[in-house]
Each structure stands twice: as structure tokens, then as C-alpha cells.
Image (tube, rainbow, N blue to C red):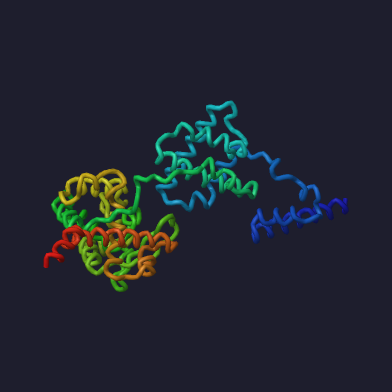
Amino acid sequence: MPLYDDQLDGIIELDESLQHLAEKFGPLQVRKALSEKEWFPEIHKKDPESRIVLLSEAVEHYLSSDAYRGLAEASQVTYKYELDLLLKYCKSMEDSDPNIREVASPGFLTQYLQPVKKQNTRSKKAAFLRSFLRETLGHFFEDGIDRLKTALKVKPDKKRGQPRAFEKQQIEELLMLARLSRDGHRNFTIIWTFLGTGIRLNELCQLQVGDINPAVQNIMVYGKGNKDFKQPTKITKSALEILCSYVHFRYSKLADKPGYNDLYIFSDDKGVSPLDDSTIQKMITNLIAEAETISKEDKGTYQLSVHSLRHSFALYLLESGVNIYKIKELMRHQWLSSTEVYLDLFSHMLVEAINKHPLGQLKASEVYGAVAYV
């Protein structure tokens, strides 16, 4: 009996020690460390490829992983939709819950993507599959997706081209049309806020009264793919004045009420919830369609849009002489390469501008003939 008690106490102590190590270093690290030791040859020699992980188990892990939870809300919705389509496709097969290794094979992926003809749709599916398989294969097998790159390769969509920015006369007309539209004060303020900050659509929708800090000329935004905390971004003086004026107009009577700072600035229910992204997208799309300074071609798909206001913010900073590194910080780009695309766009616009010069319209033969005649 005492021997049994000693063994039981040892097992309990071992369990507590392992739990402590798992909490300190993470269960995967503890497991990896044990498997690399020769104390347990059966663990050390076990082939990870022999492990069977069903698709349902992989899905459960992915939806709780940082790879998925760290995505922007719109991307989460898209990837969840794509995940449901993948599950539906597998259910139509003989094996409705296959081994994830079967799904992560060039043959399966090629067959799954083969019916998809539209390049944009294929790009979305491939992007989801890369995220899903990279996370699940890395987690369960410590493996990557290099061998799947051919199957998940996406040809660039030539229609997308360079980022599009509004010309100054187009911006002036959009602001004029916004003031004349229904909810003109709100729509005018929205456009000015975009132009004065360069923030993204979802960032603008989530703006709250307490996010404005006039003393340091900042507003607070969540940022791309970040839901945990807000970060400061600068706003021009004119945009700050217009934004503060709108907040005073809408919410001044609530300034002494509890929760005032939590009110959403752009809202249809007195600040309780934010405007939906689609509401602002539709408003900007309608203004673009109405604008006479915007050509029919520029009103097409992949041309001018609500995101073009962000591009306009960056482009006119560059035009004003702000260096690319400061623009990177103001745009909150993670990589400088994301900002450098505006250098190419600006260069292209300069070429178009110089070609409009009156002397630039003359042919060389005409210039030479005029000089010879003189």
C-alpha cells in the first residue's frame, strides 16, 4: 500500500511539473523537446507523416489560430465562406472528412480549383488555401506549402494595374456633390476625413468620439488586421476642424452623458453602432457615377473607388515634397515596398503632365523646320 501511494504521488508530481512546463513554454515546445531526446526512442523515431489529422480537426484548429483571428474582419468573413465551400466540396466526395494530407496535395487542389474560371475568384480561393494549409500543416506536421505553390499559383490580374488616385478637380467635384447629397454634412465630413488621414474604410467606420485628440492632431484607429488596440495616426488641420465640427453638431447635447467617448462618429443610430462599410462604399460609388470630371472609363471596375481616397492622400503628400519614409509612417505601411508603389504612380503622372505642355505637342520635324527657317 505505501509503495502504491509513493507511485501515485510521483505521478501527480510529474503531471504538475509537465503542466508547469507547458504553461511556461507551451505544450508544443515541451512535446518537441521530449521527442528530440533519446530517452524515448519510440517517440524520437516516430514518423510525423504517419499521423492522421482529419479535415474537421484541421478546420477546428485554424478557426482558433492567430493566422485566422488576426485577419481583418472582412477577410475573416471571406475565408470562412471559402472554408464552408471547401467542406461542402469534400462532403460531395466519397470521403466527407478526409485526411488533411489528402487535401494538401497538388492533385486535389488542382481538381478543386479547375472549375474556377474567373481570375479574381481563383485568387481569393488560392489566398485562403495558402493561409489554411500553411497554418494547419505547420501546426500538425511542422511542414510548409512549398510543394503546393504550383497548384496554388495565381496569375496577376492585369486589369488591376497601378493604384488609382483622384485628380484635384475630381476631388473638388466630389466634395461639392457630397454637400448637395442626402446626409450632405456627414458625407462631406467622411470624404474630408479620408483625404486628411489616408485611413482605410473599415478604420473610418470604427472611429469613435474619444478617438479624436486635437491637442496632438491625432486620431486613433485599429489598423489593418488589428482588433485588439488602436494606434495613433495624424490628421491635417483642415480635416480635424471639419471632423470636430461634425462631432459637435451631432453629439454636443450628449457630451455630459456616460459613454460619450464611445459613440461612433459615423452612425445611423445616434452613435450606438457604426455605419456599415457598404453604406459608405455605395455613397462614394454614387458620387463617382455622378461626377462629370470623371470619365466613363475611370468609373469602371478596378478604377476609381473609395480606396482611391487613400491613394490620393499618399500621392499628394509625395507631390508636396514629403519624403517616402515619412509617407510610409503616415500610411502605417509595414513595408517600404508598399509605399514605393506611389513613386511609380507619381512618375507616370509627371510624364502625362509634361506631355500636356504646349511645346510638348509639337513634332520634332515642325520644330526643326521652324528653326531652319529662322
Specify whether 23 is left or right of 115.
right
Residue 217 image point, x, y percent: 30, 70
Q: At which x and y percent is residue 203?
A: 35, 56
Is residue 306 something one can see in this rendering? yes
Q: Nearer the viewer, residue 51 or 25?
A: 51
Toward the bottom, the furthest residue is: 215
Residue furthest left in the image: 374
Which residue: 50% across, 35% down? 86
Query: Relative to 91, does residue 42 appear above or below in the rendering?
Result: below
The answer to which of 199 and 147 lies nearer the viewer is 147
Q: Is residue 128 left or right of residue 104?
A: left
In the image, what residue occupies the spot 17% across and 49% down? 291
Q: Could you say where residue 111 lies in the image, as x and y percent from the top left?
A: 53, 32
* Residue at point 29%, 43% (across, down): 301
User: In the rendered image of this protein, does residue 329 appear above or below residue 294?
Assistant: below
Q: So how many labels did they put on this image?
A: 0
- Can residue 259 be seen by looking at this rendering? no
Q: Quadrant of the C terminus?
A: bottom left
The image position of residue 206, as x and y in percent, is 34, 55
Residue 271: image quadrant is bottom left
Which residue is at the front of the view, 16 or 178? Answer: 178
Q: Give residue 100's quadrant in the image.
A: top right
